[in-house]
Every structure is written in structure tokens, then in C-alpha cells.
Image (cartoon, rainbow, N blue to C red):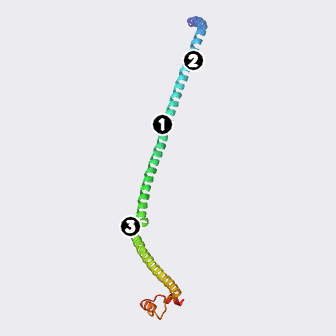
Amino acid sequence: MEYFNEYYMQRKAKTITEFYDLINETEKYRLKELNAAVKIEALWRMYRQRKYYLHQQWAISVIKRVYRGYRTRKNFWKLTNMALSHQRKNFFSSAALSIQRIYRGYFSRKYLHDFHARKKYLKYIDGKNQRRLEKMNKYQQQNFVEEQKRQEDYARMEFFKLSTNLHHLTSTKAVPGVYKVLEEVSDFGKHSLKT
């Protein structure tokens, strides 16, 4: 056992000297190792942060891309729907205009400018004009007859006035039939003498 104790002591001393040597050596390179460890940690943190930052940038670009696509599709569908609505509105407006135009033409031909109704109306107007012309001709004829009668009466009256004033020139005994013959031939002076 003695051998074991001696071996143990030697080993203990050797271990302690090795330990102190290692500690001294460690202390000698401690600042360098510390700087290296700090550098490694900084590089690791930088790598990790850069990886996180790049992942965040990638996520942001994906979100932006998806949102821009969504917004563009939404605007596209909005514009497409507006264009389609405008196209439908124009189509239905033109169809309504065509229907209105056709109906107005039909209504105009049927009620406002009806050929048969116009022909009937013109026939009625022509008949009315004929009746009016007949009345006017009758009235004109009647006026003409009355005017002739009035002129004849006026001429008889004048003749009677003249003949009554000239009775002293001729005797009725000398020319017995001058007035009598005239009275037998026409009724000249009968009306005017009575009034």
C-alpha cells in the first residue's frame, strides 16, 4: 500500500502542477479566448439575427405580394364589373331606345298619322267644303238676285220720278197706250208705286 500512497502523492502533485500550469496557460490565453468567444458569440448572434431579419423580410415580401395580388384582383374585378355593368347599361339603353322608337313609330302611324283616318278626314273636309261652297254659291246667287231686284226697283223708281215730272208734256188722251202697254208687258213700277 505504500506503493499506492507514493503513487497517489506523486499523482496528486503532478495533477496539481498540471492544473496550475493549465490555469496559468489558461490565464495567459484567457483574454484571447474571451475575445474569440465574444467574437464567435457576436458572429452567431449576427448570423441568427440576420437569418431572422431575412426571414422577416421574406415574410414581409410574401405578405406584400399576396396583398398586392389581392388588391389588384379586387380592383380588376371591380373594374371588370363596372365595365360589364356599363356595357349592360348601354345594351339595355339601346334596346330601350329601339323599343321606344319602334313603339313611337307604330303609335304615330296608328293614331297620329293614320292613313285611313286622314283619308276619311280629308273626305269629310272635302264634303264640308262642298256644302259650304254650295251655301256660298246659293248666298251669292240670292244676293245677286236681290241686287238685281233692288237695281230694277231703283231704276223703276227713277223712271217713275222722271215720268211723273214730265206728265205736262204729253197728254194721256193724245197718247193713250204709252204707259198702259208698258204695264202689261212687265210689272215695272208696281212695287215702287205701292210704297
Is residue 66 or residue 84 the one in the foreground?
A: 84
Looking at marks 1 and 3 on the same chain, the residue that comes earlier in the sequence is marked by 1
Q: Given contact means CB atoms under 8 Å apart, are the residues at marks 1 and 2 in contact?
A: no
Cα–Cα span, label 1 and label 2? 39 Å
Is residue 11 or residue 184 the one in the foreground?
A: 184
- Taking the image as shown, residue 77 lies to the left or right of residue 116, namely right
Q: Where does label 1 land, which residue?
A: 69
- Taking the image as shown, residue 48 lies to the left or right of residue 137, namely right
Q: Where does label 2 land, which residue?
A: 42
> Is 51 rendered above or below residue 62?
above
Residue 184: % across, % down: 43, 92
Q: Given contact means CB atoms under 8 Å apart, are the residues at marks 1 and 3 in contact?
A: no
Residue located 50% across and 38% down the image:
71
Q: Where does label 3 land, which residue?
A: 115
Q: Amino acid at mark 3?
A: Phe
Q: Which mark is residue 16?
A: none
Q: Amino acid at mark 1?
A: Gly
Residue 142: % across, % down: 46, 81
- Taking the image as shown, residue 29 lies to the left or right of residue 97, namely right
Is residue 126 or residue 185 the one in the foreground?
A: 185
Residue 195 placement: quadrant = bottom right
Residue 129: % across, % down: 43, 73
> Is 102 rendered above or below residue 54?
below
SS for tag 2?
helix
Residue located 52% across and 25% down the image:
54
